[in-house]
Image (spheres, grey):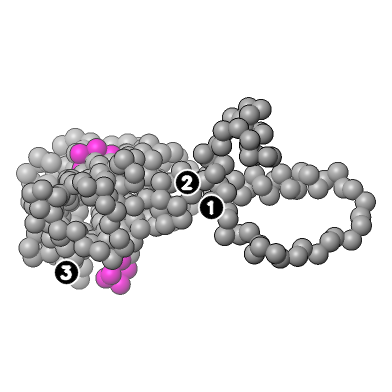
């Protein structure tokens, strides 16, 4: 905010043109004011301190920065709101059913955080609207989501009966079938399918051009690029359908997934095999990544954990644009 002499006059004696940002700050900070008539005890006499002005300025700067951050998110402390085509804000815990006349939602005023277009008949619930996170729940139907760079990765989430779809900065199509299965296809950027309800947290990574299915009983499957090699796709479907205790069959299917690689895009399911609980499957997948890309640079902090190793390989294959 740049102020001239006239703006300065308004701050001190309300003369001149009011500044809208200052008016907004005053309104937000008004609840902190003391009740009218409250007597403030006088401070005991003390020697002037040259540091007092700096402390006051620092405190004011912190308060202004906090309020401006809240203003900047377009929704106060509760975060950006969702609006329908008529400009009505959706309340938390409300349900939106898409019709031919009413099927588009915007995130934040003017869609500054993104927009959603739902297929007719889709049912969407507002689970949480927060400054740190927005969570919707798609019970059935489909939506096309476009999330702008103004929303930080992980801010926008859509729960389904099978898994949670986490935006990592992207545009995608999400569909929930009548049986609860969910399918995502990423048009731009990247998303994650995150499972948290089955005893252990698991996350799969779906970059631009890839797709993934999730099942209510098993959670997210293994992502793959559209039109991948047929032999690898068949092996992936078999691998995803097998229970974890079918160790020998899973090893055989995993070996076929690795053998089915034809170009670098086919390494997406191979990277996901690094999450398998079987060390032999992990070694098989890691060996193929090293064969194609060479060994990772040593970490200065010592040997990497399994999670850190997966993260390093993901960064090698699909660098994070937000870094």
Give the position of the N terminus as an image quadrant: top right
Q: Which numbered circle lies on residue 217?
A: 3
Query: Which image quarter: residue 140?
Result: bottom left
Q: Are marks 1 and 2 in contact (CB under 8 Å)?
A: yes
Task: Check residue 146 for magenta coloring.
Answer: no
Residue highlighted by disc 2? 71
Q: How many numbered discs, if any?
A: 3
Rendered residue at 19%/35% (across/down): 263
Give the position of the C terminus as an image quadrant: top left
The part of the chain drawn in magenta is 186-200
N-term-proximal mark, 1 vs 3: 1
Label 2 neighbourhood size at 10 Å, few (<14), some (14-19), many (20+)? some
Label 1 neighbourhood size at 10 Å, few (<14), some (14-19), many (20+)? some
Image x and y of residue 33, in percent: 63, 59
CA distance for labels 3 and 2: 42 Å
CA distance for labels 1 and 3: 47 Å
Q: Is residue 59 left or right of residue 126?
A: right
Nearer the observer: mark 3 or 2; the answer is: 2
Q: Could you say whether the residue bearing mark 1 is in a helix, strand or loop?
A: helix
């Amino acid at each position: 905010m740049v102020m001239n002499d006239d703006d300065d006059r308004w701050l001190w004696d309300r003369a001149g043109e009011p500044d809208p940002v200052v008016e907004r700050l005053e309104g937000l900070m008004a609840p902190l004011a003391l009740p009218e008539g409250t007597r403030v005890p006088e401070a005991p006499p003390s020697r002037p301190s040259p540091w007092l002005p700096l402390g006051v300025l620092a405190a004011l700067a912190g308060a202004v920065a906090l309020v401006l951050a809240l203003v900047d998110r377009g929704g106060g402390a509760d975060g950006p709101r969702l609006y329908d085509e008529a400009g009505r804000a959706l309340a938390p815990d409300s349900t939106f059913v898409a019709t031919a006349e009413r099927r588009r939602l915007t995130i934040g005023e003017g869609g500054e955080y993104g927009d959603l277009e739902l297929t007719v008949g889709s049912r969407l619930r507002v689970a949480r609207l927060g400054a740190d996170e927005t969570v919707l729940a798609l019970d059935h139907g489909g939506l096309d989501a476009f999330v702008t760079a103004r929303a930080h990765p992980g801010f926008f989430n859509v729960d389904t009966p099978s898994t949670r779809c986490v935006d990592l900065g992207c545009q995608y199509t999400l569909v929930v079938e009548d049986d609860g299965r969910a399918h995502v296809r990423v048009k731009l950027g990247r998303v994650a399918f995150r499972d948290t309800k089955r005893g252990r947290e698991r996350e799969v990574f779906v970059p631009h051009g890839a797709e993934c299915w999730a099942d209510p009983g098993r959670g997210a499957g293994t992502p793959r690029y559209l039109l991948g090699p047929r032999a690898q796709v068949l092996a992936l479907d078999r691998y995803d359908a097998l229970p974890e205790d079918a160790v020998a069959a899973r090893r055989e299917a995993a070996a076929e997934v690795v053998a089915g690689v034809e170009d670098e895009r086919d390494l997406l399911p191979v990277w996901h095999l690094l999450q398998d609980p079987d060390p032999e499957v992990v070694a098989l997948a890691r060996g193929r990544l090293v064969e194609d890309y060479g060994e990772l640079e040593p970490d200065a902090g010592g040997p990497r954990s399994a999670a850190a190793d997966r993260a390093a390989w993901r960064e090698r294959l699909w660098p994070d644009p937000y870094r």
